[in-house]
Image (spheres, coloured by chain):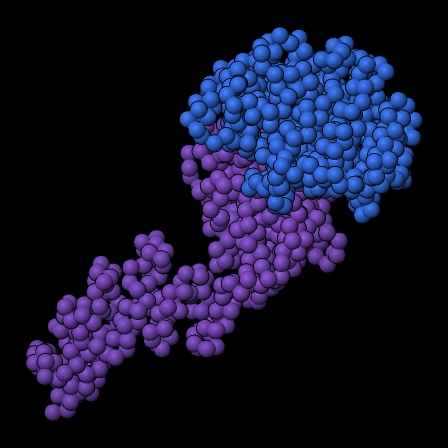
Chain colours: A purple, B blue
Amino acid sequence: MTDQSTYEIVIGLEVHAQLLTLSKLFCGDSIAYGASPNTQVSPITLGHPGTLPKMNKKAIEHAIRMGLACHCEIERENYFARKNYFYPDLPKGYQISQHTTPICKGGYVEIKSGTERRQIRLNRIHLEEDAGKSLHDVDELNTCLDYNRAGTPLIEIVSEPDLRSAEETVAYLTELRKLVRYLDVCDGNMEEGSLRCDVNISVRKKGDTRLGTKVEVKNLNSIRNAKRAVEAEAARLIGLIENGEPVQQQTRSFDADKGTTFAIRDKEDADDYRYFADPDLTPFQLEESFIEEIRSALPVLQEDRVKKYTTELNLPEYDARVLTDEKELAEYYEATIVHTTLYKAAANWMLGPVKSWMNEHNRSIAEFPIQPAQLATLIQLTDEGKLSFSVASTKLFSYLLANPTVEPLKAAEQQNLLQQSNAGSLEPIIDEVLLKFKDKVAEYKKGKKGVLSLFVGEVMKRSKGKADPKVTNEIILEKLKN
Amino acid sequence: MFVFSSIGQYHEALREGTVNCVQAVEHYLQRIEATRHLNAFIDVYAEEALQKAKDLDAKRSNGATMGRLHGVVIGLKDVICYEGHKVSAASKILRDFTSIYSATAVIRLLEEGAIIIGNLNCDEFAMGSTNENSSYGKVLNARDESRIPGGSSGGSAVAVQAGLCMVSLGSDTGGSVRQPADLCGIVGMKPSYGRISRYGLIAYASSFDQIGVFGTNIPDVAILFEVMAGADEYDSTVSHQPVEAYASLLQTDKKYRIAYLAEALDHPSLDPEIASAIKNLAEKLKEQGHEVEPVAFKLIDHIVPAYYVLTTAEASSNLSRFDGIKYGYRSKAEGLDLNELYKESRSAGFGREVKRRIMLGTFVLSAGYYDAYFTQAQKVRKLLVDQTQQIFNNFDVILLPTTPSTAFRIGEKMEDPIAMYLADIYTVMANLAGIPAISLPLFTHSNGMPFGLQVMTKRFDELSLLRFSEQVMTQ
């Protein structure tokens, strides 16, 4: 067993994100996922003779949103380039991409590494069109082609080789996915291929400043597989070096079943893509005002929210992070605290009952039936002592889930769930309990104060949870004095 | 007997009722049948054209207003897509391919009442100067059938020359409309780059290609151009500049500032008879009160190489889609792997000249050669654009020959592609600079063959181009 700890792993990522536009990058075909094969294919998508691309402005906006959120410099003078290569799922024999003028340059993404936060530098974000899909498992003898995906707008987010471990790779990908979802530029769904990742990886002895020979592992379709691929490939590279074998610059693929990588192409047959400016698309200039318009419409990002929640709302960092992990959850929370200043209680409700409901039903917050204002009322009622938290979060909560249009106070009344805090209605129950547990009363009077909770619990039980525990406590203490 | 002289007179006769569209179509169908050996047409849409003619005649007699191209019988070069009709760029690789959509230009013609009578032979993928590079065989020059008609739009030129349709469409990437017009003795116009949508025009070199028009007179060419020109949401390289009513603005007695390129007229490759004919015309124009001056043009020997580097580079990429996967010719050979399938299909599907240009273009874009060829040629293009611009700061029109010689014999130059390329010396300038140009059939050589004068104006100034041409043509 080699000692991996004497090595440093150097990782850079190329992440492709499908943009959430209605139509393709260069024509009006839909990009909706899951349609039957070859139903979203105009002559333009199919690269029929004589067809030309036309630019989708929305895709440019998305790319700029992402760039601004990643602190990139936005290129003002853009053009599209043709990347020439032959492959059956590439209808035109070239991919329209960007070459020397990526729309976003530089920038960074902040990730959590161990206990600290670290900036991972970006090299570029550029726009390009997706290819179709070659399906090798539909027909026994033939490869089938589905061109629905061909022309779907993508951004490729290229990082610098700043990542140092499989864990950081996971953190970076998690952060990117969160970011694209926050920005509404991509649904971040790796299973459907909306977010795909290639890993560039090399290893070197700790302390070395020169980079080792790099290997690219292509097309990782989940964060977990990206992690496994990094681990497997790092171990393989270290093994090679330890055995004195040379590392070859290669393109490799990850076999998720075996958990290993295998070579698909050596550097020697690296393609010459013969890039040149696509003469079918005029270069486009981005006006300052256009970029500013996009900047001013950017949503509040997680870090800004965390900062606000911890300072202005006095929430613990943990609560703030969980609440802001998804933009929609944060927005729900923010809509709730418009109606109540009980920020911490609202956070507790979100992280407790609401999150449990989401996890249990595997639903998103958008599908949560209770409106923020109702939730706020629930929180207020609990705080005012009209409802106990346990009754509110179980009985009334489930009732409201089923009847989301009923006003919470009314619901509580109808369901007879309001706490009994008036002594008149509680006293008979308390008298009963004290009578029943005569022996315990005697023990109490002898000094065994612990039995008090037994009385309170019994009263709660008999009142079906409606008794206000504080008031009950007081009355019992009063009675026991005698 | 149907006689055609111009669209204007034809429309007059239709209004008077002395002729109808069906008669016109029947006339052309007979002419096409009688001249089959010229090989100008690939497919003739006889039934369809007659039906359309009947419909138009009926509409007209019901008092419907006539479109600007009402009943005008038009042929399309086999690189222009027309929904439901075959289009192959005269290549085996697209043999029997049917277009599922229509080019923007075609839609606009049809909207004005045009009758499309068939598609016309040409050099494969518009690559060639003789129309000998066609999978459908060569086209003959109707003036002398032992000679080439020029290319690549040879079929389109002969169709108008031999009276097989009224007007026709070609495409011009480096002279493919003007050169055959010159060699066939008709009018051929290439508009400014970005004036007519290229949507539906099978690409040769995207930053050079333009649909062009063949006709026998300027007003016909002007009206066709006017109908097709203008912005199109399917082609982002088309200009949004407003389209003028060119055909109704042709008459003017304006005196122009005319430049002719000294280096071009003194070039050793130019037939001396052509040189003197143009010099004489320049003198005549001067006498008529135009300002005529020679201007220096040192770039002349650089423009053909630059043109071939840039166009073949673009072509190598544009023609990648013809891979035998989605449509078109695919090798039937068994047991081929993917790369072999590409190689076999493309090697057998493309003709020799097309393969030559794909390889040339692939070479000039390859790592290690890119800067020496592609980048360098782009610089020449930029210089040419600037110098042309400078000439137009002082002049309205530039005069040039269209070709260095009259139509040569079939087979004469096929084995010397370089000599063939160099014959494009006078036409590629307009495509490199993106300016409009026209070839006017003004002269006859002592060998009996026609030749023309080429006129160019600044980009998007087709109005001056057509007005000047009309002045020269009608005197």
Q: Position of residue A50 (x, y in %)?
A: 60, 31
Quadrant where the image shows the C terminus of chain B: top right
Q: Is residue B430 visible?
A: no
Instruction: Give the answer, above or below, for where A159 lies relative to B116.
Output: below
Identify the residue at image location x=56%, y=15%: B44
| Front residue of B330 and B148 | B148
Where is residue B144? Give x, y as percent.
76, 11
| Outermost residue to the bottom | A482
A99 or B45, nearer to the observer: B45
Residue shown at 41%/26% (left/top)?
A: B62
Question: What is the tally of numbered marks visible in this picture?
Answer: 0
Tell me where residue B298 appears, x and y as whole percent. Answer: 89, 39
Residue B190 lies left or right of residue B388; in this view the side is left
Q: Quadrant of the image for the N terminus of chain B?
A: top right
Q: Residue at x 48, y 49 (%)?
A: A20
- The part of the image, by quadrant, that contains residue B305 is top right
Q: Horizontally, is B126 left or right of B384 in the view? A: left
Q: Is residue A371 visible?
A: yes
Quarter of the view holding residue A81: top right
Tell me what residue is drawn at x 14 percent, y 76 percent. Answer: A459
Q: Quadrant of residue B297?
A: top right
Given residues A284 and A143, the one toward you in this image is: A284
User: Can you give x and y, in whole percent of width and height, for residue B473 in the image?
Assistant: 74, 29
